[in-house]
Amino acid sequence: MLKFPETIEIIEVCPRDGFQNIKTPIPTAIKIEVIDKLVDCGFRWIEATSFVHPKAIPQMADAAEVLQIVKEKHGGRVGFIALAPNLYGAQRAIEAGADAITYVVSASEKHNLENTRQTVEQSLAAFTEVCKIKGNRKVRFALATAFDCPFAGPMNPEQVIKLVEAGLAAGADEVMLADTIGTATPLQMENLLKPLAVKYPNISFILHIHDTQGMGLANIVTAMNLGITRFESAAFGLGGCPFAPGAAGNIATEDLVNMMHKMGIKTGLDYDKIIRVARYIEDKLGIAPVGHMARLASCAL
Ligand code: COA
Ligand code: ZN
């Protein structure tokens, strides 16, 4: 018998994961408009931007400006998360007023080097420092390539669990597990999430899913059945790590919300408004819809 929760939490990551993978510069005003519209959908947490090197990801060069503007408009009502790949990035995020930090470390040594130019050990040492300066904001230990790596293939769940242990020992408030390249199967979900649930029954893990091979919703159903209730997704199904070849978009928020609401699972989100965000992105960025529901909405126009 499958078990599902009554309510889940969706954390919206389009303004960071979605936009970082778009080469053409998006005007800051459009990013702000997208975030305004997302706030209106009912999200409690939105990943607004990332504090990375502007040469590595030029699209995120306006990180401080974006964060400051959306904090001024919506601060207190919605929490804004910023991603950081290293200690300096976390310092910049704190200075700019991030309510929470997603500190990214890859389970795969090779991907961590490509993405953050640090060894996993260096990333962990820097994370310990981030936890010391975090103040009263939440710091999330985000494990990229927690299931599959574009360079090293499938990750060993035991190794991943050791890294979770290290992140928690360093002072993480929360742990996020990412299928960065969107190739994991429901069986891989079970092989990692089941032992984690046994070892950490009181930790509410966050799952970050990409949908490269169309297994995103199947993975989310599997994860919910194993007790996971917090998911990251991106409106319009945008997303992908520029340092992970082959990664396609995140699971589309509108697809996730549609499935949840049809199953009677509450999200606290307004589905019609999310579709409107998707249409706005389609109009302003001129990108064809990736997700199922936005494609349907687009056809109905
Ligand atoms: N933001 C802005 N500048 C940064 C920075 C950050 N987070 N981290 C380092 N720098 C600057 C340093 O100040 C230094 O500047 P200088 O040349 O003017 O003195 C320069 O970058 C080199 O510093 P170093 O520590 O050697 O960094 P690096 O060149 O090895 O770059 C990263 C490391 C992680 C900052 C860079 O590769 C990056 O931003 N990658 C993007 C990762 C990403 O966003 N992936 C997708 C999301 S998971
Ligand atoms: Zn991602």
Image (spheres, rainbow, N blue to C red):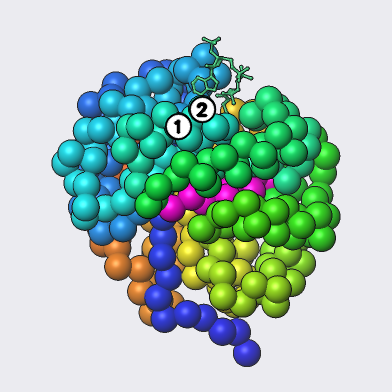
Q: Nearer the viewer, residue 136 or 53?
A: 136
Residue at figure coordinates x 74%, y 72% from the top left = 195
Q: State which region is magenta.
A: 138-145
Residue 186 in magenta? Answer: no
**Looking at the image, is 115 positioned above or below residue 164?**
above
How many labels sit on residues?
2
Residue at figure coordinates x 48%, y 35% from the top left = 90
Determine which quarter of the picture holds residue 277. top left
The outermost residue toward the left is 73
Q: In the picture provided, is 27 more to the left or to the right than 5? A: left
Secondary structure of residue under mark 1: helix
Q: Position of residue 180 (x, y in %)?
A: 63, 44
The secondary structure that dominates the magenta segment is: strand
The outermost residue toward the top is 55
**Residue 212 appears in the figure:** no
Q: Nearer the viewer, residue 110 or 42?
A: 110
Residue type at mark 2 is Tyr
Residue at figure coordinates x 56%, y 84% from the top left = 3
Q: Position of residue 259 (x, y in %)?
A: 44, 68
Q: In the picture provided, is 32 more to the left or to the right than 191? A: left
The outermost residue toward the front is 132
Residue at figure coordinates x 42%, y 39% from the top left = 82
Residue matched to label 2: 88
Q: Are discs 2 and 1 less than 8 Å apart at CB?
A: yes
Residue count near mark 1 (Cα–Cα under 10 Å), binned few <14, some 14–19, many ≥20: some
Residue matched to label 1: 91
